[in-house]
Amino acid sequence: MAYIGFVEEKGALYCEVCYEKFFAPECSKCQRKILGEVINALKQTWHVSCFVCVACHNPIRNNVFHLEDGDPYCETDYYALFGTMCHGCEFPIEAGDRFLEALGHTWHDTCFVCSV
């Protein structure tokens, strides 16, 4: 096994072929066995290259992502497509932020201030 590779699982050693056959998780997207790095998201397992933003198709890896209609979006694309930006600071208004609508725009409450 030193030449073909091995995996330790539950205190026992397995060659890569047996590990893949009996223990390796299946990718939720491509249904192939996952050997190497695994992404656990949305109560499923994925290859790193299979868990991607539906807008830009870049792997999300361990970065922040948001769901819209059950589809994962990277943070940048989510706010560009679905987010509300503050007119004052041009940062997104996120869930739980205090905000107001005035002068035809949306503002964080701390960004809507006197000009003087």
Image: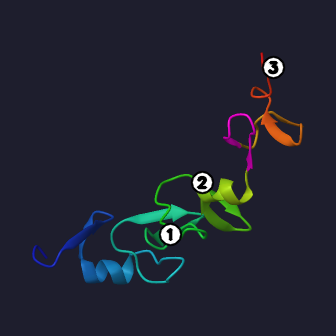
Q: Main secondary structure of the magenta part?
A: loop
- Pointer 1 residue: 45
Q: Amino acid at mark 3?
A: Cys
Mark 3 crowdedness (10 Å alpha carbons): few <14, some 14-19, many ≥20: few
Q: Amino acid at mark 2?
A: Glu
Along the viewing direction, whichever of 31 and 89 lies nearer the viewer: 89
- Pointer 3 residue: 114
Q: Residue 96: percent from the left, percent from the top?
A: 76, 38
Task: Give the secondary structure at mark 1.
Answer: strand
* Residue at 60% over, 69% down: 55
Above or below, 1 relative to 93: below
Q: Quadrant of the N terminus?
A: bottom left
Along the viewing direction, whichever of 52 and 104 lies nearer the viewer: 104
Mark 2 crowdedness (10 Å alpha carbons): few <14, some 14-19, many ≥20: some
The span shown in magenta is: 84-92
Above or below, 33 relative to 60: below
- Pointer 2 residue: 75
Q: Earlier in the sequence, mark 1 or mark 2?
A: 1
- Residue furthest left in the image: 3
